[in-house]
Each structure stands twice: as structure tokens, then as C-alpha cells.
Image (cartoon, helix red, strand yellow):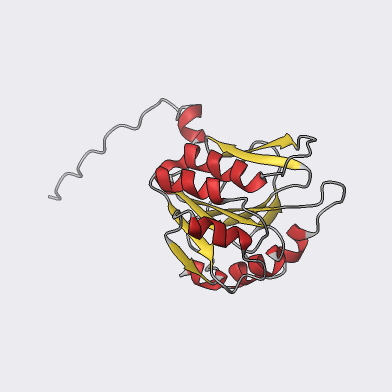
Amino acid sequence: MGKPKPSRPPRSSQPASPAAADHPPLFPIVGVGASAGGLEAFTELLKHLPLDTGMGFVLVQHLDPLHESALTQLLGRVTALPVREVSNNLRVRPNCVYIIAPNTNLSIAAGKLKLQPRPKTHAPHRSIDFFLESLAQDQRERAIGVILSGTATDGTLGLEAIKAEGGITFAQDESARYDSMPSSAVAAGCVDISNVPEEHCE
């Protein structure tokens, strides 16, 4: 006579709540900022980026507000990861790359990317700080900030915000074609690791 099969616990007849279904597993989100020389630096980063990091990558570059950007198409040629331009309320997924749209400010809330029209002002446009500060507030210790080639100081305040929340910060070293942005962040004392773009992937 065979042993009786153990009874299985009854399945819940209640469907998963919409709120639970709307929240993916927690994973790090990496904000990467660049300005002048950014295409080269982004390319080196993505060429060496493993396909299974389990992280989401959001790339923010200073773009001409009056012209369409080819950045998404150009970077899509150097990696097998999905690369797409950001649309409003787009949820960040792991192992995907998202590119800021031209003439916008980009932020993140509850894991979703938010687009706002870029304000018309004569003051310096700080799109990298804007995104990284929102990333620090939204993702806390899961936020990772990276500053690559660029002029001026955009990104320094964003890295300070990420570091204050317990996240990890990187800056490109002297290999940057334009080193003002990464050098500003290093001088502010808010960079954990300074190296070449491909070493950010290790």
C-alpha cells in the first residue's frame, strides 16, 4: 500500500493586488551623466557592459534642444542590451538602457521615468544634477551615479546627493576628453571610484 501523498496547501483564490503587480523586484539603477565628449565615453561604457548586470541604466547627456538626437540609434549599435529613448512614465527595467529625450528635464519617481519640458532660461542647464538628485531620493542606497566627460560642473551636486543616501558614485579619470565635470565631482569629495568608463563595468 503506497504512502498517502502530502496534501498541498490550498491556492489563494484572491488575485495579486494591482499594487503588488506594479512593483518589480528591487534592483540598482545607474544614472550616467555626460556632456562634451559624452558619445565616446558612453560608447566605451556600453561596449564593455555585461548583458546580465541586473541593473537599469539611464543616460543623461546635454543635448541640443532644437534638434532631434541620434544618440539612441548610435548607442544601440554598440550593445546587445535594449536601448530606448525615454518616454514619460516609463518604468525602468533591469538590463535595459534609457536615453534622455532632447529638450526635456528627466527625473524618476517610484521607479518610473518622468519627463518635463526643459525650462527656457539663461542660467546653465543642469539636467544631470536634476536627474541624479531625483534618483538619490527615489532609490536611496540602490542609486548609483556616474559622471563621464563634460565641461563645467553639472553632476557634482547629483553625486553628492547619491553619496548622502548611501549610494555608490563613480567619475571618469584623466581619460575624459573634457575633464571639468568629473574633476569637479572628485574635488568635491563625493566620488567613491575614479577610473576609465570600461572599468565602471567591473
Quarter of image, res 150: bottom right
Using the image as rendered, state which of residue 197 and residue 46 is in the foreground: 197
Quarter of image, res 181: bottom right
Q: Residue at x 36, y 29 (%)?
A: 12
Image height of 11 relative to 2, above or below: above
On the question of residue 11 being in view, the answer is yes
* Location of residue 174 in the rendering, given as x and y in whole percent from the top left corner: 57, 72
Disc tally is 0
Image height of 14 relative to 46, above or below: above
Quadrant including the C terminus = bottom left
Kindly give the residue lying farthest to the front in the view shown: 187
Using the image as rendered, state which of residue 40 and residue 9 is in the foreground: 40
* Location of residue 39 in the rendering, given as x and y in whole percent from the top left corner: 71, 65
Q: Residue at x 62, y 65 (%)?
A: 179
* Location of residue 22 in the rendering, given as x and y in whole percent from the top left corner: 52, 34
Q: Residue at x 26, y 35 (%)?
A: 9
* Location of residue 49 in the rendering, given as x and y in whole percent from the top left corner: 55, 68
Using the image as rendered, state which of residue 74 and residue 126 is in the foreground: 126
Q: Is residue 88 left or right of residue 122?
A: left
Q: Residue at x 87, y 47 (%)?
A: 66
Q: Is residue 63 left or right of residue 150?
A: right
On the question of residue 147 being in view, the answer is no
Image height of 172 relative to 7, above or below: below
Q: Is residue 140 left or right of residue 176?
A: left
